């Protein structure tokens, strides 16, 4: 049986820099990806988030989809600076209705330079 998910899901992603690398952290799924630049980290977190959701749908495993990030990660997001909203489309697998998820993005602070 196909699973239908909310077509207007909102996820929260915080980007931060540590030791010269950028990280993107999707808080609802507690997924973290890195990159040499913020743009690379952004693309990597989008790719892994999409794959995570599509796998859960395809395998009818929605109860394991959400695994929230720890408090410290949410605090980092709440103290961050908004940088945009990215819309991602989840693949229409096994007759699942396609959906668009909004990634609300923030950086750790007002500075976007990674030393």
Image (cartoon, rainbow, N blue to C red):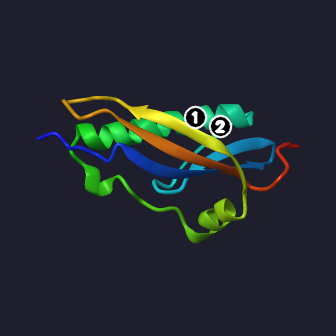
Q: Position of residue 2 (x, y in %)?
A: 16, 39
Q: Residue at x 19, y 30 (%)?
A: 95
Q: Residue 51 falls in which quadrant of the image?
A: top left
In this rendering, position of residue 55 left or right of residue 38: left
Q: Residue at x 21, y 45 (%)?
A: 60
Q: Residue furthest bottom?
A: 71
Q: Nearer the viewer, residue 17 or 3?
A: 3
Q: Position of residue 91 (x, y in %)?
A: 34, 29
Characterize the local packing of mark 1: few (<14), some (14-19) or many (20 or more) Cα atoms within 10 angstroms: some
Would you place residue 29 above or below residue 49 in this image?
below
Q: Residue at x 68, y 62 (%)?
A: 76
Q: Residue 34 falls in which quadrant of the image?
A: top right
Q: Quadrant of the C terminus?
A: top right
In this rendering, position of residue 81 left or right of residue 59: right
Which residue matches tag 1? 44
Q: Position of residue 93 (x, y in %)?
A: 25, 29
Which residue matches tag 2? 41
Would you place residue 110 above or below residue 50 in this image?
below
The residues bearing labels 1 and 2 have C-alpha atoms spaced at a distance of: 5 Å
Q: Residue at x 31, y 32 (%)?
A: 98
Label 1: element kind: helix
Q: Which mark is residue 30?
A: none
Q: Residue furthest right?
A: 115
């Amino acid at each position: 049986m196909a699973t239908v998910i909310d077509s207007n899901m909102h996820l929260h992603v915080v980007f931060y820099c540590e030791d010269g690398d950028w990280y993107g952290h999707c808080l609802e799924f507690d997924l973290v990806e890195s990159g040499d630049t913020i743009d690379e980290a952004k693309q990597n977190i989008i790719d892994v988030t999409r794959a995570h959701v599509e796998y859960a749908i395809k395998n009818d495993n929605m109860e394991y989809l959400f695994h929230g990030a720890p408090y410290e990660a949410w605090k980092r997001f709440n103290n961050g600076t908004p940088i945009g909203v990215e819309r991602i489309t989840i693949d229409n697998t096994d007759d699942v209705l396609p959906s668009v998820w909004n990634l609300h993005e923030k950086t750790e602070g007002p500075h976007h330079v990674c030393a």
